[in-house]
Image: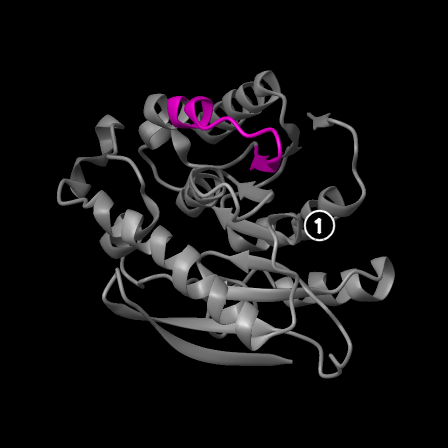
């Protein structure tokens, strides 16, 4: 069962769309919460930007049925345009030399969105639904550029999320500053699931190993800081929702059951 809302963000000064995935029978249930950035791509193919969602509802239903873990899915639609999404999901100025088409980038848009996420979106959900209200029971998912935002949110706001699913993280766009930010905001309570595909290239300007090398650097960085970290590599993985959707269950399993640091190549 899905419910939808529109919510005004005071710092961002704009309205966003939220889709909520929850079971029809929720009486007596207190939910963990999994927030999805690029939320139009989370649940429904008909709403997805490229005609294919990650079909996260299926993974959430499977989690309830087989793992007996109840997760409320919260999908936050992005702003809907290329530059709008870049502004919304980029906490640092782009330094990749191929990104000059985004010269009008405004990182304050992202900072305002992140503040609104913590002060408006999370309280709205936790007031409307019966959820746990602590970072150990809140999870966040992002892919590509939004994966950098997911990591940024969790480390910038210490009481926000302890579990991060960062899929095909585009941190190479501002890598030096991003790695410095992670080190400066060290938090061993954060558990990070990294996913990357070996056949990824979302733009002709990026070499095929760009995402892979960035993910390896993130893995090494988090590992050196003492975080619980997993890097999952799909040798046939492409940069799209269908591939990411195939690994959502793996992220959820990491949250609840995987105590070991595992790297798959």
| Visible residue check, residue 44 | no
Where residue 201 sits: x, y (%)? 43, 37
The region drawn magenta spans: 180-197
Q: Quadrant of residue 133?
A: bottom right
* 35 over 203 or under it: above or below: below
Image quarter hosting the C terminus: top right
Image quarter hosting the N terminus: bottom right
Q: Using a 10 Å C-alpha cutoff, classify the residue at mark 1 as few (fewer than 14 neighbours), some (14 to 19) or many (20 or more).
A: many
* 104 over 216 or under it: above or below: below
Q: Looking at the image, which residue is at 66% across and 53% down?
A: 137
Left or right side of 190 for 251: right
Q: Quadrant of residue 7?
A: bottom left
Q: Looking at the image, which residue is at 27% across and 54% down?
A: 82
* 57 over 4 or under it: above or below: above
Where residue 158 sits: x, y (%)? 50, 41
Left or right side of 186 for 30: right
Q: Looking at the image, which residue is at 73% across and 26% down?
A: 261
Foreground: 186 or 214? 186
Q: Which residue is mark 1?
A: 252
Q: Secondary structure at mark 1?
A: helix
């Amino acid at each position: 069962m899905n419910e939808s809302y529109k919510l005004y963000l005071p710092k961002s000064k704009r309205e966003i769309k939220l889709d909520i995935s929850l079971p029809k029978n929720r009486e007596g249930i207190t939910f963990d919460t999994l927030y999805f950035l690029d939320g139009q791509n989370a649940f429904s193919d008909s709403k997805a930007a490229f005609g294919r969602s990650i079909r996260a509802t299926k993974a959430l239903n499977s989690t309830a049925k087989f793992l007996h873990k109840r997760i409320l899915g919260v999908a936050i639609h992005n702003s809907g345009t290329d530059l709008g999404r870049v502004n919304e999901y980029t906490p640092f100025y782009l330094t990749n030399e191929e990104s000059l088409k985004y010269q009008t980038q405004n990182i304050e848009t992202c900072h305002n969105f992140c503040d609104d996420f913590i002060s408006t979106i999370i309280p709205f959900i936790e007031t409307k639904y019966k959820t746990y209200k602590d970072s150990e029971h809140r999870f966040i998912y992002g892919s590509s550029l939004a994966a950098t935002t997911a990591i940024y949110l969790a480390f910038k706001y210490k009481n926000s999320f302890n579990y991060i699913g960062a899929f095909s993280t585009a941190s190479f766009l501002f890598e030096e500053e991003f790695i410095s930010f992670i080190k400066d905001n060290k938090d061993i309570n954060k558990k990070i699931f990294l996913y990357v595909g070996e056949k990824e290239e979302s733009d002709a300007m990026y070499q095929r190993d760009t995402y892979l090398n960035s993910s390896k650097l993130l893995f090494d960085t988090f590992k050196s800081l003492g975080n619980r970290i997993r890097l999952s590599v799909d040798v046939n993985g492409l940069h799209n929702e269908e591939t990411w959707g195939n690994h959502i269950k793996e992220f959820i399993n990491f949250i609840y059951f995987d105590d070991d640091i595992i790297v798959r190549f």
